[in-house]
């Protein structure tokens, strides 16, 4: 069975780690099926449901990834990689793992209500830098100042 430990993370750390910070408007939830490769032809492994939320990008606050940011981005649930690993553990005899999970303490109750996302863009995907790495528009001035700080 997987074990998870949460490690508190500060806003300035998230801003440093993020290679893309965007101001957004939430649109809708999404779900996509992920096929699990199976080495045992006799065993059927159920599809994994990767879920997340789509956002309209209003402005780009930081872009060290140097990418062209599309008007709409899809951000998977922060835990999707761990959930996929647990799915494989359960259905495909995958290894049990322990996780140290960085977590940001935000007052925004859900990613759906986020106005600012702190992301890591890698191989065409947009993922939250740490668990709950999003903020409200009230934090925009503070975020902008931290981005500009050396």
Image (spheres, rainbow, N blue to C red):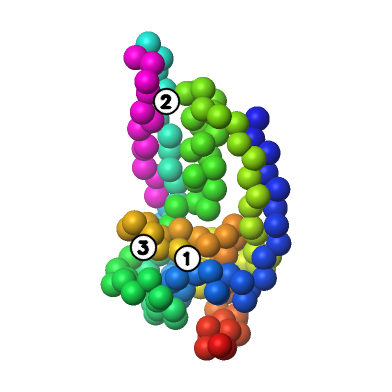
Instruction: Tell me the crowding category of disc 3: few under 14, some 14 to 19, or many 20 or more residues within 10 angstroms, Cα based.
Output: some
Q: Residue 82's spot in the image, x, y percent?
A: 54, 42
Q: Residue 119's spot in the image, x, y percent?
A: 47, 65
Front residue of 120/33: it is 120
- Residue at 41% x, 23% y: name it: 45
**Which residue matches tag 3?**
73
C-alpha span from label 1 to label 3 = 11 Å
**Which residue matches tag 2?**
46
| Drawn side of residue 4 relative to residue 78, left or right | right
- Residue at 70% x, 48% y: name it: 5
| Residue contact at pointers 1 and 2, CB within 8 angstroms | no
**Which residue matches tag 1?**
119
Mark whose residue sits in front, 1 or 2: 1
Q: Which mark is residue 141?
A: none
Magenta-highlighted residues? 30-41
Q: Earlier in the sequence, mark 1 or mark 3?
A: 3
Q: Residue 123's spot in the image, x, y percent?
A: 34, 56
Q: Secondary structure at mark 2?
A: loop
Residue 35 belongs to magenta span: yes
Instruction: Tell me the crowding category of disc 1: few under 14, some 14 to 19, or many 20 or more residues within 10 angstroms, Cα based.
Output: many
Residue 17 belongs to magenta span: no
Question: Compared to 46, does 146 lie above or below?
Answer: below
- Residue at 54% x, 48% y: name it: 79
The answer to whether one can see residue 122 in this image is yes
Q: Secondary structure at mark 3?
A: strand
Question: Compared to 122, does 89 lie above or below?
Answer: above
Front residue of 12/111: it is 12
């Amino acid at each position: 069975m997987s074990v998870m430990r949460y490690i508190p993370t500060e806003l300035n750390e998230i801003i440093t780690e993020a290679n893309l910070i965007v101001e957004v408007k939430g649109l809708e939830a999404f779900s996509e099926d992920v096929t699990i490769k199976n080495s045992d032809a006799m065993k059927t492994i159920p599809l994994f449901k990767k879920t997340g939320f789509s956002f309209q990008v209003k402005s780009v606050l930081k872009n060290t990834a140097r990418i062209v940011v599309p008007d709409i981005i899809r951000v998977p649930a922060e835990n999707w990689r761990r959930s996929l690993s647990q799915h494989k553990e359960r259905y495909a005899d995958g290894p049990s793992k322990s996780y140290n999970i960085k977590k940001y303490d935000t007052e925004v109750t859900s990613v759906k209500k986020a106005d600012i996302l702190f992301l890591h863009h890698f191989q065409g995907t947009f993922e939250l830098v740490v668990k709950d790495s999003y903020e409200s528009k009230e934090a925009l001035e503070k975020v902008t100042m931290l981005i500009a700080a050396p």
